[in-house]
Image: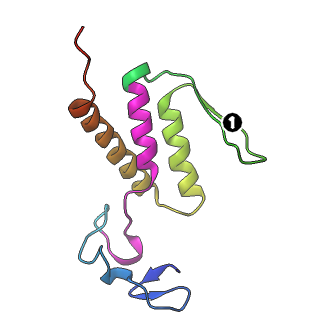
Amino acid sequence: MGVTAGGTSASGGRGRGLAGPGAGLTSIGGGSGATWGWPASGGATGAVAETIQRIFGSRTHVVFTSSVAGTVPHEYFQTDSMVEEVINARVYGGMHYRTSGVHGVRLGRQTAEWVAEHYFRRLKD
């Protein structure tokens, strides 16, 4: 499956393009066509950051490791640093505009807040 725009994919086939599930929606920034963007996948990072902050505070030492050969651990001393790195990586990698990363993180944080307030409650002593 290729990238779609206006119904024709970059791989030459017919795709959903702007006639698919996002038809008629405006972008985060109010643009259309090539300037629009969905909230980025940083939403998961925003949800993780919000959850860590709620449990341990924002100045928490976090280390992410991977079982993939040749990778190095990512170490953070505050959750905002973790979020900023994810947003930057998606922008520098050409996958998202910064605005979609920021909005994705905001969406993730709001989701984590809602879940924490509605489902995770202190057990009675």
Q: Position of residue 103 (x, y in %)?
A: 36, 51
Q: Quadrant of residue 121?
A: top left
The amino acid beneath tag 1 is: Pro
Q: Is residue 110 above or below residue 3?
A: above
Q: Residue at x 21, y 33 (%)?
A: 118
What secondary structure is marked by label 1?
loop
According to the picture, the residue beneath numbered tag 1 turns out to be: 73
Q: Is residue 82 left or right of residue 120?
A: right
Q: Position of residue 99 (x, y in %)?
A: 40, 55
Q: Residue at x 55, y 49 (%)?
A: 88
Q: Position of residue 91 (x, y in %)?
A: 54, 56
Q: Which sits in the foreground, 103 or 64?
A: 64
Q: Residue at x 59, y 56 (%)?
A: 92
Counting other residues with Cα less than 10 Å from the Cα at mark 1, is it few (<14), some (14-19), or many (20 or more)? few
Q: Which sits in the foreground, 20 or 26?
A: 20
- In the picture, which quadrant includes the C terminus? top left
Q: Quadrant of residue 48?
A: top left
In magenta segment, residue 37:
yes
In magenta segment, residue 38:
yes
Q: Residue at x 43, y 28 (%)?
A: 52
Q: Is residue 54 left or right of residue 88?
A: left
Q: Position of residue 71 (x, y in %)?
A: 73, 44
The outermost residue toward the right is: 70
- The region drawn magenta spans 31-53
Q: Is residue 53 above or below residue 95?
A: above
Q: Is residue 111 above or below residue 80?
A: below
Q: Which sits in the foreground, 24 or 44?
A: 44
Number of marks: 1
- Magenta span: predominant SS is helix
Colour style of the rendered protein structure:
rainbow
Q: Is residue 82 left or right of residue 104?
A: right
